[in-house]
Structures are given as C-alpha cells and as structure tokens.
Image: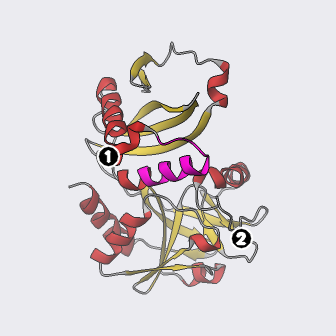
Amino acid sequence: MKTNFLLNNGQFEQANEKVFPIDFFENILFCQQVRSVRDQLPFWNEHLQLIELKLRLLGANPAPFLHNKGKELKRQIERTLTKNKFFKSSHIKLYLTRENETIGYVIQANPIESTSFTLNTVGLSINIFEKAPKDFSLLSSLDFGSMPIWKIAKAEKLKTDYDELLLINSKQAILEAPGKNIYVIIDNQIFTPSPTCGAYIDPVQSAIGKTLEISGMGLTTTGDLREEDLLNADEVFVANSLSGIEWVKAFKQKRYFNKKVKIIQKEFNRLLLV
C-alpha cells in the first residue's frame, strides 16, 4: 500500500494523478526523511534543526512554516497521515522546494506496519568499503553532502552478500554505513564516530545518547574507530531515525550476540514512545 494523497503546499492531490512540471525537480532543494510512529514524530526537533541548517547553507530565505518549532509543518504532516489513514507508522518524505522567492514543500508518506521501532530478528553482516573514502568537509555530516558516496557504496553492496558496507576516511577510520550511524560496544562503553572525522550525523544520535545514559552505559565519540575495534567488540549496532536500532551479527570472522542491544532497544522505545 502506498500513499493515495500528496500534500503540495497545503493542498491535497491524488498521488497517482499528480504530474509535476519539468522544472519542479530542478527546484527541489533536498528531501528530509522522517518516521512517524502512531501519533508521534520522534526526533522532530532534530529534524527541524537539520532542515534549517540545510536551508541556511543553500542561502534560502527562512520559511514561515518552520516558525514556532515547525508547528505548522508538523501540522501539515499530521494532516497527510490522517488523509491517507496511516495510523500505525509511516515513512515520510518531505521535499523542500524553491519557489520564486519563497520555500515550498511536498509531503509524501508510505505506511509501515508497526507501532514501534522493532529490532531486527536476523542480525546484519557488515564489511568495510575502501574504494571511496569520505573525509571531513562542510557537508560531510549531512545526508545531502554524503549522498554521492552512499550511492557508490550501495551499488557496490549489490555485488556482495553483505547487508551493510561501512565507509572510511583517508586515515582508514570507520565513519558510518550509508544513512546510518554505527555504535561499537566494548565492555560497558559505546563508541561512535565523530563528525570531526567526516562522520554523518543522524537525528537519532541524541536519543541514542539519552538511552545509553538511562541504561547505565557511556557514549564516547571518536575520530579513530578501527577495524580492530570491530574485531574486539562485544556487540555492534547501527541506527537511524527511520529504522531505529539494528543489531549486527557478523564482521569478517567475528560473530556478535545482542544481549546489550536488546536492553538498549527496550529503553529506546520506552524513551521515545510514551
């Protein structure tokens, strides 16, 4: 089942009948992907901060629908979900567009048949992608600055049996999986790559930090996460704001369980879905 209605600058349009003008796609500034769960929009403030940062970087004028902590934009997303009768969860694509001297939006949503962030039952297998290192830049911590290399890594993944390929920088430090942060558990300490070495920042990061604090675990950002750390780790997981937490079962000959990841996952849902 897919969305029946798009919301185009406040007006509903039939998704299967909408034909955008040719210059519409040229005017898309970026797409912010958001997850709804029941009647909530987790990580909303973090998404909003990233949207505002991207608009500033692109030299766009402030959009009125982002005022008051994005209250109006949030209301329009909620309208879209209600119109499409998506009441469990949804994957929302929010397209920000440049329209003359103003900023517009198009909201598209597709349903997810779950009422929480669900931990994967089969762990992921991962490997390191070395062909296209990603280093620090003004845009490296943002999705639209990382997208070209993510596309290359995803294309390479199709040629392998791995579920995720991890990007590295020119110093061989591990950064992320495409669109996902990586977290490495050693004893009771969790390590994740720092944006200062080129790593992507996902809106989920602040919630992960709070979850780990509640669980009695510490979170350390590092610019020097290595293959050896993965081989020495007790457990590993990746996370983003769409899928939540996903546990990793294998890296090369190393095999992981998910005892602590299950605890983190439980507290993660408890923290977000009150």
The secondary structure that most of the magenta stretch takes on is helix
**Residue for badge 1:** 68
Report which quarter residue 204 is drawn in: bottom left
- Relative to the observer, which residue lies in front, 5 or 45? 45
Q: Secondary structure at mark 1?
A: helix
Relative to 152, is 66 above or below? above
**Residue 29 at x, y = what percent?**
60, 39
Pick whichever, 63 or 144, lies toward us: 63
Residue lying at 31% horizontally and 29% vertically, measured from the top left: 79
Residue at 29% over, 64% down? 266
**Residue at image mark 2:** 169
Picture mark count: 2
Is 2 placed above or below 73 here?
above
Q: Secondary structure at mark 2?
A: loop
Going by the numbered disc 1, the residue's amino acid type is Asn
Callouts 1 and 2 close, C-beta under 8 Å: no
Estimate how packed mark 1 is, as few (under 14), some (14 to 19) or many (20 or more) residues with alpha carbons within 10 Å. few
Up-down: is 35 above or below 273?
above
* Range covered by the magenta-colored residues: 48-62
Residue 57 part of the magenta-drawn span: yes
Amino acid type, label 2:
Asn
Residue 165 in the image: state x and y as whole percent.
65, 61
**x%, y% of residue 77?**
36, 35
In the rendered structure, does residue 202 fall within the stretch colored magenta? no
* First of labels 1, 2 by sequence position: 1
Q: CA distance from mark 1 to mark 2?
A: 38 Å
Instruction: Using residue 53 as the reference point, say whether residue 119 is left or right of it.
Output: left
Q: Nearer the viewer, mark 1 or mark 2?
A: 1
Q: Quadrant of the C terminus?
A: bottom left
Quarter of the view holding residue 207: bottom left
